[in-house]
Image (cartoon, rainbow, N blue to C red):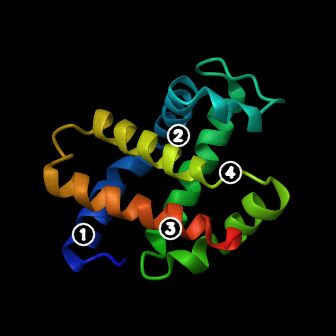
Amino acid sequence: MSLTQAERTVILSLWDKVSTQADAIGTQALERLFASYPQTKTYFPHFDLHPGSAHLRVHGAKVVAALGEAVKSIDNIGGALAKLSELHAYILRVDPVNFKLLSHCLLVTVASHFPADFTADAHTAWDKFLSIVSCVLTEKYR
């Protein structure tokens, strides 16, 4: 699966706005993940998982920063996220389905922050982009 030029343009355009609210979007996406899919909490036994906690803010910022690396390397997402894939597969041993769950939560969070910009075309492009990111992150599981 690859992105069309039009999809890349949409992603890059919206990313300019997402990056200005990266911490809030990352935190809210994690809050949404843990509320909607409580089984994902098992990977964070040492975190305070209450909404707005310092742990969620810090990890949410890391999640969106990694997404930013994927956006910056939109033509080589696999290369940009290879070390992150290894970390989650070999060291953290995260169930790969969680990447898809988090992608969905990121999609909803971005849409809620930028409703006017989140057109049907933007939704399609971001959904495809996040699917590629999820797929890349599961590479080391295969």
Residue type highlighted by circle 4? Asp
- Looking at numbered disc 3 in the image, what kind of residue is underneath it? Ala
Q: CA distance from mark 3 to mark 1?
A: 14 Å
Of callouts 2 and 4, which one flags the residue occurring earlier in the amino acid sequence? Answer: 2
Q: Earlier in the sequence, mark 3 or mark 1?
A: 1
Q: Residue furthest top?
A: 50
Residue shown at 38%/48% (left/top)?
A: 18
- Foreground disc of the pair 2, 4: 4
Determine crowd level at label 3: few under 14, some 14-19, many 20+ residues with C-alpha closer than 10 A: many
Quick one: SS at disc 2?
helix
The location of residue 51, given as percent across then percent down, is: 59, 19
Q: Secondary structure at mark 4?
A: loop
Q: First in sequence: mark 4 or mark 3?
A: 3
Q: Position of residue 137 (x, y in %)?
A: 60, 65
Say which residue appears at 62% left-offset and 72% top-offset: 139
Gap between marks 4 and 3 measured at Cα: 21 Å
Residue positioned most to the front: 142
Q: Quadrant of residue 89?
A: bottom right
Q: Which residue is mark 4?
A: 95
Instruction: Report the mark closest to the observer, 4 or 3.
Output: 4
Disc 3 element:
helix
Frontmost of labels 1 and 4 is 4
Q: Residue at x 75, y 68 (%)?
A: 86
Work out which quarter of the rendered image holds the C terminus and state it: bottom right
Q: What residue is shown with label 1?
A: 7
Say which residue label 3 marks: 70
Query: Label 2, label 3: how many angstroms apart (C-alpha)?
Result: 15 Å
The residue where tag 2 is placed is: 26
